[in-house]
Image: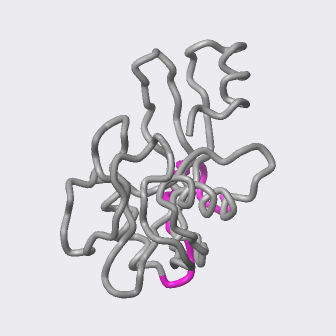
Amino acid sequence: MPTPEFVLELRRFIGHRPLWLAVGIGVVLDGEGSVLLHRRSDTGRWALPGGIIDPAEQPADAVAREVFEETSVLAVPELLTSVTVSGQVSYPNGDQVQYLELTFRCRPAGGEPAVNDSESLEVGWHQLAADPGLSARDRRLIDTALGCTGAAAFSFSWAGPAPGS
């Protein structure tokens, strides 16, 4: 999927300056020890499916949409497992962005893994114990999704005054 139109419109005003965007990421687990991954066309690496949340779109809807767009698998988000912030990303065209990442554990509800857009070179189920070369970030998101028991994981680093002071 190409860059969303609303991002292109914003870029006309701000140029390559840093842009803050929210993304939805799906950790789709098949219940048999495998996770759904796609090999990205931009980096050649295996990764979790996900992408930019459109304006006014619910994050869980965005995850289901992105998983389908990238893998042809229908996924049902079941649990928000983490809320994280990426490092700053600089793209080859000079665009800078930082992402608020909302990761959902999902179950498959239909469809067979297949390349469904230009963002993926390959798509498939991968055993959780095997590592096809995932980034440390994706491995961490998978581990967090697997260990999540009902409350989203997030970091909190406020260094303000202690409560009650």
Q: Nearer the viewer, residue 31 or 79?
A: 31
**Rendering coords of residue 2 (x, y %):** 57, 33
**Rendering coords of residue 78 (x, y %):** 59, 78
- Whether 159 is drawn above or below 165: the answer is above
Q: Is residue 163 magenta-colored?
A: yes
**Residue drawn where x is 36% and y is 39% of the image:** 41
Q: Is residue 119 magenta-colored?
A: no
* 108 displayed left or right of 44: right
**Residue drawn where x is 67% and y is 15% of the image:** 14
Q: Nearer the viewer, residue 37 or 26?
A: 37
- Whether 60 is drawn above or below 99: the answer is below
Magenta span of residues: 149-165
Q: How many marks?
A: 0
**Rendering coords of residue 11 (x, y %):** 65, 19
**Residue drawn where x is 20% and y is 75% of the image:** 129
Main secondary structure found in the magenta portion? loop
